[in-house]
Amino acid sequence: MIVEKARLIQPYGGELLDLLVPRKLLVEQTAYARTLPFVQVSSRVECDLELLAVGAFSPLAGFMNQADYQSVLDTMRLADGTLFPMPITLPVEASAVIELGADLALRDRKNNILAILTVEDRYEWDLKEVATKVFGKYDSRHPIVAEMHRWGKVNIAGKLKVLRLPPHLDFTELRRTPAETRAVLESYGHNNVVAFQTRNPLHRVHEALTKRAASNIDGVLLLHPVVGMTQPGDVDHYTRVRVYKTLIDNYYEGDRSLLSLLPLAMRMAGPREAVWHAIIRRNYGANHLIVGRDHAGPGPDSRGEPFYGPYDAQDMVMKYAGELGVKPVPFTEMVYLEDEDRYEENSKLPNGAKVRKISGTQVREDYLGKGVQLPPWFSRPAVSRILADSYPPRHRRGICLWFTGLSGSGKSTTAEHIVNLLLEKGRNVTVLDGDVVRTHLSKGLGFSKEDRDTNIRRIGYVASEIVRHGGMVICAAISPYRATREDVRNMVGDGFMEIHMATPLEYVEAHDIKGLYAKARRGEIKGFTGIDDPYEPPLNPDFTLTAENTRAEDNARSIIDQLIELGYVRPD
């Protein structure tokens, strides 16, 4: 498909959105906003607000009202019939006093005023409906489904006035609005632009893929990495942008490529997300989009199965290509042809070709995890050095051992043995025990579901900071609810090991030294996990143990053996 140059620079929907308050009114409107009731928005809403304000989500002009929201869930279209597959909403707590017709200030986490919303709609939303219709199924292993349990249960919408964009202090020269991006692309003088959506470092196979895509359409490559919110555990955007800059400055043609950053909060929604990405890239000036294998897929579900088929996203973008004005450039997996020193798609390999490839898992575990340099046929040496600096060998990285199980199942006892074994092997470790945390970090919380979730997320936040700084942490808390544990997994990211102490209820009751189960059976303790409050066991834990007929020290040694095998602990 050839798109005329005049059409190339037009946004999806054919008009520019301008939600930003004019500079001459900014001081007056900001002073007014300080007098208003307000809500503090999440990082995800900050990303959405910014892209709404600059026209990246055109033709969407604000957070969705109920009519648009329901239509998008059911038909992938706004209420007026315009194709738009992703719900963009502003959730608030149901208890919040928000009157229709009233003005509301939107503040970020640091209390900066970002926008004024005139509330015109207020409606409840259903988590399972969103998960089923947008992600294909309700599964708490999906990172956004786990996160949605924290969202307010009511969405609000209305006229939006943006007073300031969320501040960014990093890579400011690479942060361009859609209008700025289109202007640069137009100056290159080519009719076609192919965008490359990425949330990972670029290796030589990606370099070959993107160059081939631009050559095939005789156009320009828009290297457009996501630097907002991606999949938990992804390489941080600071490291990734250093990689992109190194490659774009040294290995791409200057008048045929543009690096620009996208502050998008991804939803990991596979096929729907691919169509959304096409709309966004159209607004930035692209008329082609590279759609790779399992585009925007979140990885395996709770049972270890993929959420989407490997080429579902390609098929869906192709289905709507005419309406989008964006043609997908599909690629199958690419490999290195050793004898010919070049890269080729799997589907186009000559007979008997000798190929080499390294999966993303191998990059993390067999190379970066072990401190082994990536081979030059796979990654440019400068890229390998950047990744090695940011991701040292696993024995110098952090990990969270998250014990979950019934009260008395052996979590704390096993953890105590692990601590001593780790200290013997030269690794320092922090223990966040459920009972101790409730004495200090979570003092004052009760045992309602809301308070239990708050307690677990507090433990998870502290654990994530320890891991981020290279520490080992053992968390031993009942953590009865599956979705909350998955939320913690997302906080910690890479380096989270869920250990299920699957000791049977009958066993822990029979060995109940504190007599808590007996009190719960008599009704003296209400809401006791396993008796009158549910325990949701992991569906696919990283490790399963039991205290029944097993010594705690043997359980501990099995965990240490696993840590040695994974590289987090050096063998003697």
Image (cartoon, rainbow, N blue to C red):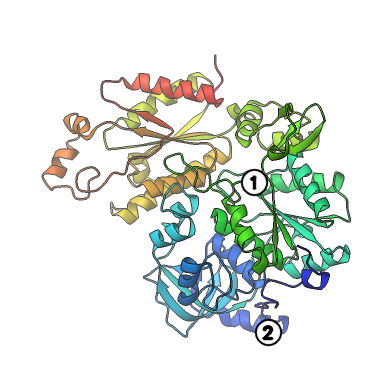
Of the image marks 2 and 1, the number of the one nearer the N terminus: 2
What's the residue at 22%, 35% (across, down)? 505
What's the residue at 26%, 20% (across, down)? 549
Image quarter (top left, top right, bottom left or bottom right) of the N terminus: bottom right
Q: Residue furthest front?
A: 351
For marks 2 and 1, give the one nearer the viewer.
1
Q: Does residue 229 appear to the left or right of 74 in the view shown? A: right
Crowding near pointer 1: few (<14 within 10 Å), some, many (20+)?
some
Q: Does residue 48 appear to the left or right of 22 in the view shown? A: left
Q: Position of residue 35 (x, y in %)?
A: 53, 80
Q: Which structural element holds mark 2?
A: helix
Judging depth in this view, the residue of 367 and 93 nearest the camera is 367
Judging depth in this view, the residue of 391 and 537 nearest the camera is 537
Q: Position of residue 29 (x, y in %)?
A: 62, 82
Q: Position of residue 78 (x, y in %)?
A: 54, 73
Q: Amino acid at mark 1?
A: Asp
Quadrant in the picture for residue 82: bottom right
Image quarter (top left, top right, bottom left or bottom right) of the C terminus: top right
Q: Position of residue 543 (x, y in %)?
A: 41, 30
